[in-house]
Image (cartoon, rainbow, N blue to C red):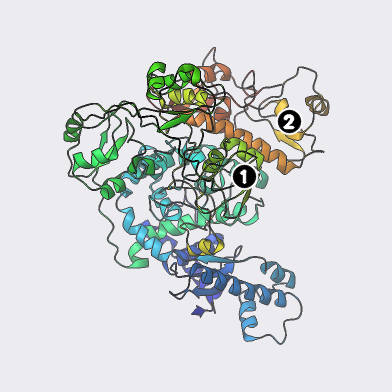
Amino acid sequence: MRHGPGGYRSGIRALVAAAVAGCALASPALADSRQFPRPPQLEPDIQFWQRVYSQVTTQGGLLHDDRYLDVVYEDLSFPASLSPKERADLVDAERGKYERILRRLGGGPHEGLSPEEQRVLALFPPNVTNAALREAADRVRFQLGQADRFREGLVRSGAWERHVEETLRKEGLPAELSALPHVESSFNPRAYSKVGAAGLWQFMRSTGRRWLRVDNVVDERLDPYKSTIAAAQFLNANYSILGSWPLALTAYNHGAGGMRRAKELMGTDDIVTIVRNYQSRTFGFASRNFYVSFLAALEIDRNSERFFGRIERAPADSSHVVKLPYYVPAQTLEQLLGTDRELLHSLNLSLLDPVWNGQRYVPRGFELRVPGGADPNQLLVRLGGAERYTLQKRDASHKLRHGETLEKVATAYGLKPEELAAYNHLAAGDVRAGTVLKLPPLQPLGNATVVAAAPEPATPAPAAAAETAPEEVYVVRSGDALSEIAKRFGLTERALMAENALKNPDFLFEGQKLKVGKGTAVPRGAAAPPAVGIAAAAEAIAASGESHEAPAADESRPLVESARAKPQPVSREEAVAQGPGLVPGIESAASADPSDYSVSDDSVIVQGAETLGHYADWCNVSANRLRALNHMRPGATITLGKRVRLDLSHVSAATFEERRTRYHHQLQDEFFQRYQISGQERYRLRSGESLWTLTQKTSVPVWLLRQYNPETDFTNVRIGTEIVLPKIEPRGAAAPEAPPKPPRAPDASPGVGR
């Protein structure tokens, strides 16, 4: 069943006029016009999203012009019997029909038109040109309805809205921001996007790690409480950089760096000018519509009865928090609490599959949420006599790599070398690269006991047939994650990204071909050789804050993501049939990094932790060539915030940007595996202080300081200069160690390098 829009455009113009005229009477539904302006020029866009959110369900959608949202060609309704593929085929067929009509209208005189062609032409102004109609043929877009999801989100929001509002108040942020999860996830803390964004606030993994723990055991993006605190800090940082809420909200999708570039290039912070006129290959439909969709969601949220009738929101969550003093099996917690696993899981969504299937314990220090009727103190008392551990559960075996010794492995796992050798019936001299060492199970504390007798010598089992032959190319399948593919072929995720020129580790699609070298593939589901050696295990000890214990295999670098946590490659049919938020497959909370990594007029602005050597490598030229191009003397340094000319005769600007962005992604990813941001403060430089001494005292690297102070001239800071100083804290309880070094030698002083 399909419905034509008829006089929709004229109708929406009437709605616009009524909305503008009645603005003063709309009471609490509207946002504070000083902080969240609602320009009349954007009213058709807001009305479009109100229609999507409150009138059209996921059993249909709108075919429309992706630039002029008051041009709606058709309201599609999907019969319940249609499969995802049939839905996609229907959308494609209808889109193609309107593309042909528009090209026909744009090809000549508007005479002898069919009724359908006349209807489409009437959607445009009377003076529309043929060229404009031909251009419109390339802008026909389908938007899946969201009304049923939005209504469900209104119900769900009751569980956490009190916490969201309180968190915003503590951060000094406008209460209107509490409507943002409607746009991001329909208030579903279990939501995953197809590019790996997760949770109530749809953080990407790289962005979430700045404030949250994200590994293959705990993913706090799925914790509605902790992710809300992180989102408030992220929004606060965006606002401090951009100075207006329309831009700060758009930056939630497009990144603060992208919005700062838009502001500079357009010469204004006017949201209408930027939305209508800013051109960038990354500023697409979702970014252009993020602010208007937020305003639409806010009005519906504040006037839900007007749009949906009476809504009974879920009661506020009444769970309590218990901070666990030990590592505890999930099954033990179920028994002690007398509750079923599904309830415990629903309260602790951040605990991933390895915890629930017994591969890992609930981590020590984890803030476990228990049902409102449970007594947290009683649980702690019961833990005193139950199965608990001082170490995280380890894998059953460890395969030695080149350079590893039995002593190093034993130390890394909290064992004595002779104990490990005896458990494997080996002499120290028998251990060499490729040896698979069995690891003894951990002994629990308390009354529960586990017998750890040495195993009988085992007859080697025949090797399982590799699911994929050791080829040079791997074809991505449904359920794959980049980190898992890398581990199966004995590679690091970074190496696999570099080999395939991938910008984003979270985006894979079904059928994608990846170069994997000639390593031996590991059977799917089998234990793969670690992609890093004992050196990384030692880093994990420091990173987890437990230097006196064996490394928690899950609490360092996320070598393998849980199946629940990894992005799922999808087909076009599934993309049409699914997807909360603006448009399936578009990143949310895409980047907390506001630095400008773009090339403009064959030159770049120097960012933190960059050297002339970096630029030479990324350009495939010598450093001397760049010195000559920039009239630099031998030994002269580049300065943070200054512009440097490039020689792009061997690479394209896009390739340079890709290499540069990948470098910073790796640098920052390594840093945020050790540290997280807990807030920010205003700080004035005192006598005897410089940016260099400040970075040494606070462990805040210069690139992070630069990100929080994009308008500050770092070449001319003086006593009394006020800066925004991010507060960082190590992940875990250990004292801060030195921050990780960049992949190349760091600059000798903030923002300066040879």
Residue 443: x and y in percent read: 29, 26
Ranked by sequence position, the earlier of labels 2 and 1 is 1
Which residue type carries mark 1?
Lys
Q: How many marks?
A: 2
Whether residue 125 is situated above or below residue 444 in the rendered picture: below
Q: Nearer the viewer, residue 91 or 105?
A: 91
Which element is circle 1 on? helix
Which residue type carries mark 2?
Asp
Which residue does the image show at 47% across and 51% down from the upper left? 36
- Residue 58 placement, left or right of 723: left
- Residue 305 placement, left or right of 644: left
Which element is circle 2 on? helix
Q: Assess disc 2: are there few (<14), some (14-19) or many (≥20) residues with their C-alpha within 10 Å of its C-alpha.
A: some
Q: Which residue is mark 2?
A: 617
Quadrant of res 383: top left
Whether residue 15 is situated above or below residue 353 in the rendered picture: below
Q: Is residue 565 visible?
A: yes
Residue 431: x and y in percent read: 50, 21
Residue 607: x and y in percent read: 64, 30
Q: Which residue is mark 1?
A: 263
Whether residue 365 is situated above or below residue 254 in the rendered picture: above
- Residue 492 placement, left or right of 611: left
Q: CA distance from mark 2 to mark 1?
A: 31 Å
Q: Nearer the viewer, residue 663 or 544?
A: 544
Quadrant of res 375: top left
Q: Assess disc 1: are there few (<14), some (14-19) or many (≥20) residues with their C-alpha within 10 Å of its C-alpha.
A: some
